Image: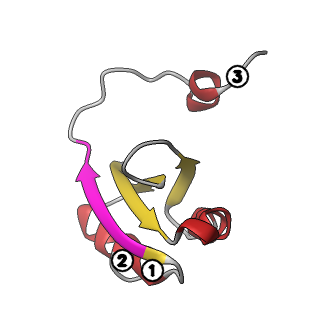
Amino acid sequence: MVTAIVFVNAEVARIPEVGEAIAALEGVSEVYSVTGQIDLIAIVRVRRHDDIAAVVADRLNKVDGVLSTQTHIAFQTFSEHDLDAAFSIGG
């Protein structure tokens, strides 16, 4: 499994809709709205490196409201923590 972390800048007024549209794409496992210089972070999980281009360049970048993206490919995993537990608030 290949994991890519995609930083997404979106039209500010459309961040919720853009996030939902990205989350619905095949190959996208999670989308987070974040603070800072970027608006959304999408986690892409695919079988092959070539599949990242299909998800990011062919689909994610074409979502209406996406202004720009920056893709980071993970090459080593240090933790297998459950992402839902890691990002849950309260509990």
Q: Amino acid at mark 2?
A: Ala
Q: Which residue is mark 2?
A: 54
Q: Amino acid at mark 3?
A: Ile
User: Does dot 3 land on a helix, a strand or a loop?
Assistant: loop
Q: Amino acid at mark 1?
A: Arg
Q: Visible in this render: residue 18?
A: no
> Who comes first in sequence, dot 3 or dot 2?
2
Q: Visible in this render: residue 50?
A: yes
Contact flag, marks 2 and 1 (Cβ < 8 Å): yes
The residue range painted magenta reads 67-74
Identify the image quadrant of residue 64. Answer: bottom right
In the drawing, does residue 84 fall left or right of residue 32? Answer: right
User: Does dot 1 land on a helix, a strand or a loop?
Assistant: loop
Q: Which residue is mark 1?
A: 59
Q: Which residue is mark 3?
A: 89
Residue toward you, 14 or 8: 14
Name the residue at 37% across, 55% down: 7
* Residue positioned most to the front: 13
Of badges 2 and 1, nearer the viewer stands: 1
Horizontal and vertical percent for residue 32? 55, 47
Name the residue at 66% across, 65% down: 20
In this rendering, the answer to whether 82 lies above or below 21 is above
